[in-house]
Amino acid sequence: MDKNKLHSLLIIEDDKKLASLLTIFFEKYEFNVTVEYKGDKGLTHALTSQPDFILLDLMLPVMDGFSICRALQNRFNGIILVLTASDEEMDHVSLLEMGAHDFIQKPINPRIILARMRNLIRLTTAVSASEEAASPKTNIQHGKLKLNPTLRCAYLDQQSVTLTDSEFDVLWLLASRADSIVSRDELYQTVLGREFDGLDRAIDNKIVGLRKKVDDNVGPHQRIITVRGKGYLFVPYGWE
């Protein structure tokens, strides 16, 4: 994400006074702001316009924020920040696992939201630059596993493996660093564009899903190994 460009922001919030205040604040900082007051219309706008950021309220008419997050998984390329009055840890974990990048506790302080956005812009910009410099554009092959980064396809023993975008990104990063431990911090920043908080299980869950799809779901694992307290290790000879 280019930190110097004019960013687009979709606010999905049924409190019209709050939505108006947020619009005035972010337009002052040169965001291109659109507001939707109903969940279903917000989802449609998000999918068709693909804004850089979404500020998403949880309690919405027609379709709630949880359902919107779930529907946007693997279909939205921007950053989702959830506005919530809930202090339930499980709600926050569920939202992060469904693709939200961060959550903002109500009552809302627009300056805190802006600071979080700027931090996420810095993270995604740094990750994009690192990937462009370090990631090869050619196929990766280890034994029976072949990854095509252009088509974002994976093949195992010449059979196509159906992966989500984020699962492919995890497997690509691990395979490109074969025989080296990739930390959870790096996986979170590279794949999800956010920092690992020590509690979030999103990457662990993606690893579980990956192992099932590449026939490595029964321990002891031979292809993608968990290195306790450090991260994950892709074993190249495990794919022979």
Image (cartoon, rainbow, N blue to C red):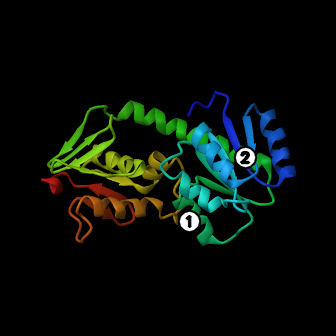
Instruction: Residue at 58%, 56% (x, y): give it.
Output: 69
Q: Earlier in the sequence, mark 2 or mark 1?
A: 2
For this orientation, the residue located farthest to the left is 240
Instruction: List x then y, in percent, for residue 14.
Output: 78, 54
Q: Secondary structure at mark 2?
A: strand
Q: Amino acid at mark 1?
A: Ser
Is residue 61 or residue 203 the one in the foreground? 61
Q: Is residue 132 left or right of residue 90?
A: left
Which label belongs to residue 94?
A: 1
Point 57% across, 43% down: residue: 47
Depth check, front residue: 115 or 210: 210
Residue at x 74% of width, y 37% of height? 33
Quadrant housing residue 206: bottom left
Q: Which residue does the image show at 75% across and 49% down from the upper left?
A: 112
Estimate how packed mark 2 is, as few (under 14), some (14 to 19) or many (20 or more) residues with alpha carbons within 10 Å.
many
**Residue 190, position as x, y percentages in the image:** 45, 45
Residue 50 seen in render: no
The x and y percentages for residue 88 are 66, 72
Q: Nearer the viewer, mark 2 or mark 1?
A: 2
Q: Position of residue 124 (x, y in %)?
A: 53, 40
Horizontal placement of 235 versus 123: left or right? left
| Mark pair 2, 1: CA separation | 21 Å
Numbered tag placed on residue 11 in the rendering: 2
Q: Residue furthest top?
A: 5
